[in-house]
Amino acid sequence: KQEVTQIPAALSVPEGENLVLNCSFTDSAIYNLQWFRQDPGKGLTSLLLIQSSQREQTSGRLNASLDKSSGRSTLYIAASQPGDSATYLCAVENSGGGADGLTFGKGTHLIIQP
Amino acid sequence: NAGVTQTPKFQVLKTGQSMTLQCAQDMNHEYMSWYRQDPGMGLRLIHYSVGAGITDQGEVPNGYNVSRSTTEDFPLRLLSAAPSQTSVYFCASSYSKSGQGTYGYTFGSGTRLTVV
């Protein structure tokens, strides 16, 4: 059974810092890995999707990497801003059989201090 | 606005009552799914559908029922509500690329359900 782990569970940093969120998964048979953002009381917003054949994806100040063989992904946030405060979720889509759908980590709760 | 619409946003049920959570999407996505989000557990897949008339179970299907009569709608039915079903429920839609997984995940804003 696929398991997704996110470290750290919570992070608080001053505005302007660069930071890295980590995600690991146990089964490398995946189609893709996604990073989502969730604001309190809201739904999920897709930030970046990395296909299993790709190494990284970038969108603005966000960069996500994928090392499928080691079961790891990182989300790099450059020049953090208070508006980046949210919970960040990592999810993988399995390709090795079983139920379709995404397997999520428990998230990293990020606070950017003004 | 295009996207996934969930109703209601909040609901309180008594143990044993039944209800239906509604989910509709207007992006012509063939794939739809329901997740529940509990503190300390992350999001878990309840049921999913790869197209009209086709549904299947996810990780935590017990106590829930789904049907998919149209591409747009994917309601989730609680048959006899239990306190353990207190949770936030999210509906999502996406499209598939043959042999490459599903893409374009769009989530609704959620239904916060309390069973007393």
Image (spheres, grey):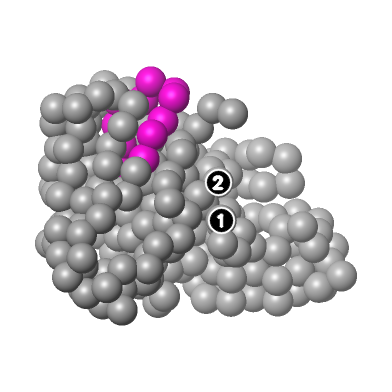
Q: Residue at x 54, y 27 (%)?
A: B2
Quick one: B20 or A17, which is closer to the camera? Answer: B20
Q: Report x, y in % for residue B65.
A: 15, 50
Is label 1 in a helix, a strand or a loop? loop
Name the side, left or right, on which A46 lies relative to B75.
Answer: right
Residue A45: assigned label = 2
Is label 2 in a helix, a strand or a loop? strand
Q: Report x, y in % for residue B16.
A: 17, 70
Local crowd size for mark 1, using a 10 Å CA cut-off: few (<14), some (14–19), many (≥20)? some
Inspect the image, locate mark 2, and give the three-letter code of the amino acid beneath it: Thr
Instruction: Count every numbered label the image shows and give the total.
Output: 2
Name the side, left or right, on which A110 lies relative to A80.
Answer: left
Q: Quadrant of residue A51?
A: top left
Q: Nearer the viewer, mark 1 or mark 2?
A: 1
Q: Are the residues under marks 1 and 2 on the same chain?
A: yes
Q: Quadrant of residue A114?
A: bottom right
